[in-house]
């Protein structure tokens, strides 16, 4: 259709995509074979059939298990390259990619293996497609503060290739303030800060992310809408929200795409963006997310253009590079 063609042609930045969440079942099987790792599925169809979730934790249990096939530098490079092939096809000009080092270091995979593989994939994508990218190191919030500090120490030799720190995994019961000192240390190292908040957690977790973690960008943020004064603040401060429509549907953050608040967020003056979160698990890459939201909520070209422009405005790029994309 016309709208699909418009979405496909729009240059965009993707600001919320977990590289481990871009592991397609086909590559999972190929890596399982290459590394002689047993996986609890006997076909690609069986893997896809297992991707039925009723909340964030259901998903995370399956997602961390899937990551077990990632063992070598080449695996991480192949994973990143597969994502960038899809991103290029979706006209993504810039990507800021989350990775979860603890998911790997806790299995005995070296931090340097992960970094060498991912950065090689990023450099290949720049050479092949002209796509620029940055890495955001996420701390797993279900683990403790000391484990996050140990991860930050491992990152120190790699700070030239890491733009920001983030916070992901199980939100309920793991409020942002648990990582106040880690984020303060990351800031002192010159890193920007983002956090998942208000996906399942209450508006107070969003306030903590702003006030305690001093975030530069808010990941998800959906439940902010329950608190009008918080919405007013996010709009006034022009905080970028990285919203993920298909993820919200699959993890039951919204009951139906027809109830997605993307247009309400735009109407409230929030700087919202559209992203794929974990595209291999949630049924689509960034253009699929634009399309699903546009169809369900009747977004027109003007709204879609605003969402794409917001993705560059919210990117961690120098002002002149942002201006060149607008
Ligand atoms: N890790 C990968 N995707 C995530 C999400 N949507 N929320 C929290 N942690 C995640
Ligand atoms: Zn996420």
Image (cartoon, rainbow, N blue to C red):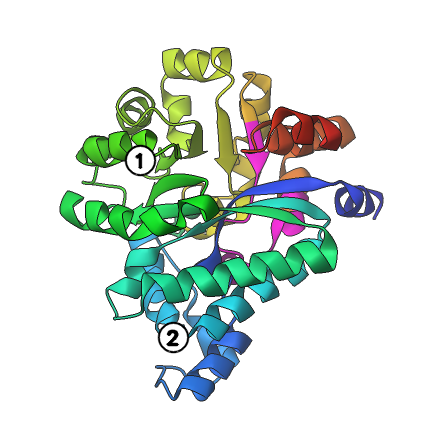
> Would you say 35 lies left or right of 153 here?
right
Residue 48 can be seen in this image: no
* Percent of width and height locating residue 99: 41, 53
Q: Nearer the viewer, mark 2 or mark 1?
A: 1
> Would you say 133 lies left or right of 235 here?
right
Badge number at residue 98 = none
Looking at the rendered structure, the number of numbered marks drawn on it comes to: 2
> Would you say 196 lies left or right of 131 here?
left
Q: Please tell me how crowded label 1 is: few (under 14), some (14-19), or many (20+) other residues with Cα within 10 Å.
A: some
First to last magenta residue range = 272-291
* Percent of width and height locating residue 77: 52, 67
The residue that mark 2 highlights is 71
Residue 4 can be seen in this image: yes
- Check if residue 253 falls in the magenta segment: no
Mark pair 2, 1: CA separation = 27 Å
Q: Please tell me how crowded label 2 is: few (under 14), some (14-19), or many (20+) other residues with Cα within 10 Å.
A: many
Q: Secondary structure at mark 1?
A: helix
Q: Earlier in the sequence, mark 2 or mark 1?
A: 2
The residue that appears at 38% across and 16% down in the rendered structure is: 230
The residue that appears at 26% across and 23% down in the rendered structure is: 212
The residue that appears at 41% across and 31% down in the rendered structure is: 221
* Percent of width and height locating residue 187: 33, 30
The residue that mark 1 highlights is 186
Q: Residue 101's quadrant in the figure? A: bottom left
Q: Secondary structure at mark 2?
A: loop
Q: For this rendering, which residue is in front, 88 or 137?
A: 137
> Would you say 134 lies left or right of 303 here?
left
Q: For this rendering, which residue is in front, 154 or 268?
A: 154
């Amino acid at each position: 259709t016309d709208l699909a063609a418009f979405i496909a042609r729009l240059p965009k930045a993707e600001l919320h995509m977990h590289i481990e969440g871009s592991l397609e079942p086909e590559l999972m099987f190929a890596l399982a074979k290459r590394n002689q790792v047993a996986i609890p599925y006997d076909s690609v169809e069986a893997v896809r059939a297992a991707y039925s979730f009723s909340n964030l934790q259901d998903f995370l249990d399956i997602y961390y298990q899937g990551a077990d096939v990632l063992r070598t530098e080449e695996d991480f490079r192949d994973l990143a390259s597969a994502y960038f092939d899809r991103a290029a096809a979706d006209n993504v000009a810039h990507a800021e990619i989350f990775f979860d080092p603890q998911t790997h270091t806790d299995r005995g995979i070296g931090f340097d293996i992960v970094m060498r593989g991912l950065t090689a994939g990023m450099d290949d994508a720049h050479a092949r497609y002209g796509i620029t990218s940055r890495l955001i190191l996420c701390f797993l919030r279900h683990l403790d503060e000391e484990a996050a500090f140990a991860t930050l120490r491992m990152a120190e030799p790699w700070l030239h290739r890491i733009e920001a720190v983030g916070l992901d995994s199980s939100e309920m019961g793991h409020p942002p303030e648990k990582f106040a000192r880690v984020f303060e240390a990351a800031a002192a190292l010159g890193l920007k800060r983002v956090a998942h908040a208000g996906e399942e957690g209450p508006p107070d977790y969003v306030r903590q992310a702003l006030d305690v973690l001093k975030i530069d960008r808010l990941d998800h943020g959906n439940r902010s809408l329950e608190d009008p004064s918080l919405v007013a603040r996010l709009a006034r401060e022009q905080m970028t929200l990285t919203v993920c429509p298909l993820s919200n549907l699959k993890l039951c953050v919204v009951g139906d795409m027809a109830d997605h608040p993307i247009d309400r967020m735009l109407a409230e003056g929030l700087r919202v963006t559209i992203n794929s979160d974990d595209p291999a698990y949630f049924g689509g890459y960034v253009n699929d997310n634009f399309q699903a939201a546009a169809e369900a909520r009747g977004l027109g070209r003007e709204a879609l253009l605003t969402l794409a422009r917001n993705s560059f405005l919210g990117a961690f790029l120098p002002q002149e590079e942002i201006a060149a994309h607008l």
